[in-house]
């Protein structure tokens, strides 16, 4: 956990949920890029837990830090929760979608809606690490952004 938090602060962090059974929880961090924000770098932390093994539905929560304006620079944080659903597996790769709602704060507080897709890799069956790429559309009262992310995460039972 300490290494994950350190990676967040050093590189600006982001993470998403994915994991094939038997792991039922996931925590991650990574870095994001958004052309619509200034500065364009962003970061986030995420947590997921499997709520249905039969349908492979995951409860997915995310804390994203971007900016809503460049002058004066105004950071924007969004805290959202929703579902992540794997659509197709290709060996150690999983393609899935997510949908979320929550709250965004910058100079004002309002609704945040987010949705997107991600390709997650779990290259080692005996190791808990996941990596991947994600694209999400974030809509808040302040702005709308497309956020591209690199994912690093860890799974556990």
Image (spheres, grey):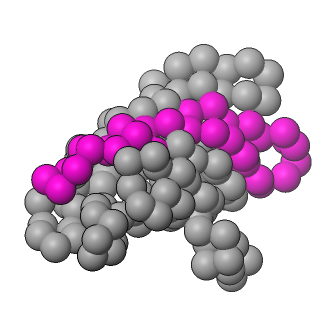
* Residue at position x 73%, y 77% in the image: 3
> Is residue 44 depicted above or below 151 in this figure?
below
* Residue 109 seen by the camera: yes
Instruction: Judge from the rendering whether residue 102 lies leftward or rightward of residue 117; answer left or right.
Output: left
Say which of 123 and 140 sits in front: 140
Say which of 32 and 24 sits in front: 32
Q: Image quadrant for the N terminus?
A: bottom right
| Position in image of residue 54 (x %, y %) | 49, 26
Where is residue 64, by image quadrant?
Answer: bottom left
Q: Which residues are magenta?
A: 118-147
Instruction: Judge from the rendering whether residue 13 lies leftward or rightward of residue 77; answer left or right.
Output: right
Instruction: Judge from the rendering whether residue 143 lies leftward or rightward of residue 131; answer left or right.
Output: left
Say which of 114 and 128 sits in front: 114
> Is residue 88 depicted above or below 118 in this figure?
above
| Secondary structure mainly formed by the magenta segment | strand
* Residue at position x 66%, y 70% in the image: 11
Q: Magenta span has 123?
A: yes
Q: Magenta span has 146?
A: yes
| Position in image of residue 144 (x %, y %) | 27, 44
All told, the count of numbered labels is 0
* Residue at position x 34%, y 44% in the image: 145
């Amino acid at each position: 956990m300490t290494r994950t938090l350190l990676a967040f602060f050093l590189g600006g962090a982001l993470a998403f949920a994915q994991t094939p059974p038997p792991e039922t929880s996931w925590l991650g961090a990574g870095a994001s890029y958004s052309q619509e924000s200034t500065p364009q770098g962003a970061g986030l932390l995420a947590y997921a837990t499997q709520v249905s093994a039969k349908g492979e539905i995951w409860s997915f929560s995310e804390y994203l830090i971007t900016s809503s304006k460049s002058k004066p620079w105004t950071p924007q944080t969004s805290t959202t929760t929703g579902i992540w659903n794997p659509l197709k597996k290709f060996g150690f790769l999983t393609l899935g979608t997510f949908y979320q709602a929550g709250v965004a704060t910058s100079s004002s507080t309002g609704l945040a809606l987010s949705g997107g897709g991600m390709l997650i890799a779990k290259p080692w069956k005996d190791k808990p690490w996941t990596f991947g790429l994600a694209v999400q559309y974030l809509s808040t009262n302040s702005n709308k952004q497309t956020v591209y992310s690199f994912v690093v995460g860890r799974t556990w039972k």
